Amino acid sequence: MEQNKLFAETPPLQLFLRAAIPGAIAMLASMLYDTADGILVGRFLGADTFAAVTISLPLVIMSFAVSDLVGVGSSAVIAVEHGKHNFDRANDVFTLSVIMIHIGGFVLGAIFFLFAPGILILLGAKGELVEQGSIYLRVYASFLPLISINYAADNFLKICGMIRRSMMLSFIIAILGTVLEFFFLAVLRLDVAYSALGYCIAMLFSAVFGMWPFLHNKQILKFVPPHFSWELVREVCANGLAVFLQNISGRIYSLIMNSTLLALGGANAVTTYGVIFFSAGIITPLVYGEADAVQPAIGYNWGAKNKHRVIALTRYVFIAGGLIGLTSAALMFLCPELLVHLFIPDATPELFAMAVPALRTFSGALCINWIYFCTQEFVIALKLTKISSVISVLATFVFPVTAIALLAPFGLNALWYAPVVGTILTVITSIAILVHIRNKHFNGIPVRHLDTTR
């Protein structure tokens, strides 16, 4: 198969560049619509609505958790099965995964639509924050059964070697969504519901475009009569559990952080966290995107027992992640004023005085959190499900929430250091895991020249 030849025979550097560059660009584009959403809401609907969107957005991201769970889990299983030339089983996994995603989207969409106001009230929101946030969340919930397949389609296309088409999914969402939201908010002067509607329409177009190649069953991944098996469900969920836990626990952390900030600093503190959140949304996708894009190639070579190529590809992933992380941290530390003005052009002096030092503090986390992202994708590619699940929960929930609990009693200024403390603990754990994997699975394997490893 052409894509298997790509994974097995292409020189590692060439393979890395071919996968990582489109993957990073695609992931950046997919997150740019979140960033553009923040910019447009802040500029045309004001700081209060921006705060409402900041509180609601973690819930929106959580609503796509099942799609991410199944998409990442199934792609890891499929890549390894292709490496073993078990194509029939790979097709069973593919078919079952698509069914699971649509069922999960319907169930979660109903839950978030019905209980949106109550959830926001539990988080400490009041008045306009509840009203605006509920509207925003309910629009996404209404579309969820149709658009949740987007996250899995990206992985399915990569497995079939359609990396460019995979990248185009993100551009459809980012460009069409931004254009529609700008038209609704800046031209028609509509409310926050249309902020969400613009991107839901874009994601619907993207979902159709992403799944279209599979409808004719001419790809290496084919729809087959579904053979429901709890064994397949467990295997898919086990391999995607790390990303699922990362998304869920990460969003729970964001909700806890927002609630704590709301209690200590009011709406200005939540708005400041929103600026940090949306700013990081410009940066971290580059690291996650390049690591995630190379994951199928690493998984294939792991399944084919070609450990030299696994080592070579993984080294490139970490080198690129380090360059992106350090550069991004420097830019955030040196240019925080630019980021504040980008999202909140009419920021008050009080908001400005709070946000600038908070952004500089957060840049410390950006310096090193790329190590975690690269480690996580590497562990998932090797199907080390227990390790990936544990590190996900530690990195996105246990460590940062512990940091909040320890620092919140010292006031708002101390609380801004919670992400940095959590990231330091996460990186220490990631390095320990890498050493463990090296000693257990790659001990004694000589590292050949990276560009010639076959």
Image (cartoon, rainbow, N blue to C red):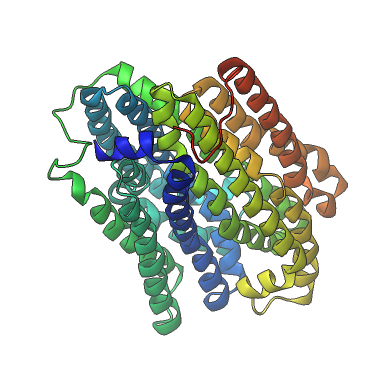
Number of numbered discs: 0
Give residue 373's position: percent from left, percent from top.
59, 41
Q: Is residue 269 above or below residue 307?
A: below
Residue 50 found in image quarter: bottom right
Q: Nearer the viewer, residue 433 or 51?
A: 433
What's the residue at 76%, 71% (across, down)? 352
Quarter occupied by the N terminus: top left
Q: Is residue 191 visible?
A: yes
Taking the image as shown, residue 454 lies to the left or right of residue 254, namely left
Give residue 9's position: percent from left, percent from top.
37, 36
Q: Is residue 127 visible?
A: no
Taking the image as shown, residue 409 lies to the left or right of residue 154, namely right
Quarter occupied by the C terminus: top left
Taking the image as shown, residue 256 lies to the left or right of residue 294, namely right
Q: Nearer the viewer, residue 136 or 76?
A: 76
Q: Nearer the viewer, residue 225 or 319?
A: 319
What's the residue at 42%, 44% (across, down)? 64
Q: Is residue 320 above or below residue 107?
A: below
What's the residue at 55%, 27% (across, down)? 388
Give residue 291's position: percent from left, percent from top.
51, 43
Residue 30 found in image quarter: bottom left
Q: Nearer the viewer, residue 442 or 324?
A: 442
Give residue 365's position: percent from left, percent from top.
72, 48
Residue furthest to the right in view is 410
